[in-house]
Image (cartoon, rainbow, N blue to C red):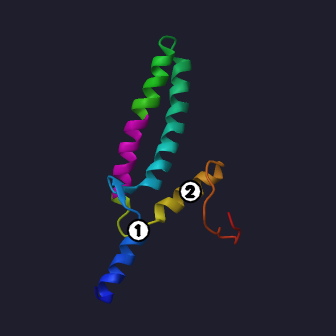
Amino acid sequence: MNPKDEDLLVSFLDVEPVMVGGSTLPELIIILKASVLVNAVAGLILALVIPFAKPLVFGFFLVFGTFITVVVVVKWLKGHKRGKPSEYFLQWASRKMAIFNLMKPSFIDRKGHWY
């Protein structure tokens, strides 16, 4: 094995493998958490407004709404990942989720504070 192949191997090991639609597993987990939260709130609001079949409306939003949201966000993310570093959207999402105390980002803030 020549040194050029070793550098190639190291660069492959450094990048997370793509799971679904160009997204990595940590990105999919963040997308899933956010979409379950959003669809649970939307389903609960609609279930309170609609007088009949409240569990059916809530369950529909929780299951199918989450699935549709994940598919749409993964397709959107695939188009926006071009030209960005491999962990760019993961860090962006973890920083946004840290605002609502849903996740702690694993990097240094602009102010120099460790998380």
Q: Residue furthest front?
A: 1
Residue at left offset 43%, top offset 36%: 66
Looking at the image, tell me whether mark 2 or mark 1 is earlier in sequence order: 1
How many numbered discs? 2
- Is residue 67 found inside the magenta-colored segment of the image? yes
Amino acid on which the number 2 mark rests in the picture: Ser
Q: Main secondary structure of the magenta part?
A: helix
Q: Percent x, y for residue 7?
A: 36, 83
| Residue wearing tag 1 | 15
- Is residue 2 found inside the magenta-colored segment of the image? no
Q: Residues within 10 Å of mark 2 (few under 14, many from 20)?
A: some
Amino acid on which the number 1 mark rests in the picture: Val
Quadrant position of residue 9: bottom left
Q: Percent x, y for residue 32?
A: 47, 44
Above or below, 75 against 115 in this view is above
**Residue range highlighted in magenta:** 66-78
Q: Nearer the viewer, residue 44 or 25?
A: 25
Above or below, 11 against 39 in this view is below
Q: Residue furthest top?
A: 52
| Residue wearing tag 2 | 94
Q: CA distance from mark 2 to mark 1?
A: 18 Å
Which part of the image, by quadrant, shows the N terminus? bottom left
Q: Percent x, y for residue 73?
A: 40, 48
Above or below, 52 against 78 in this view is above
Residue at left offset 40%, top offset 43%: 70
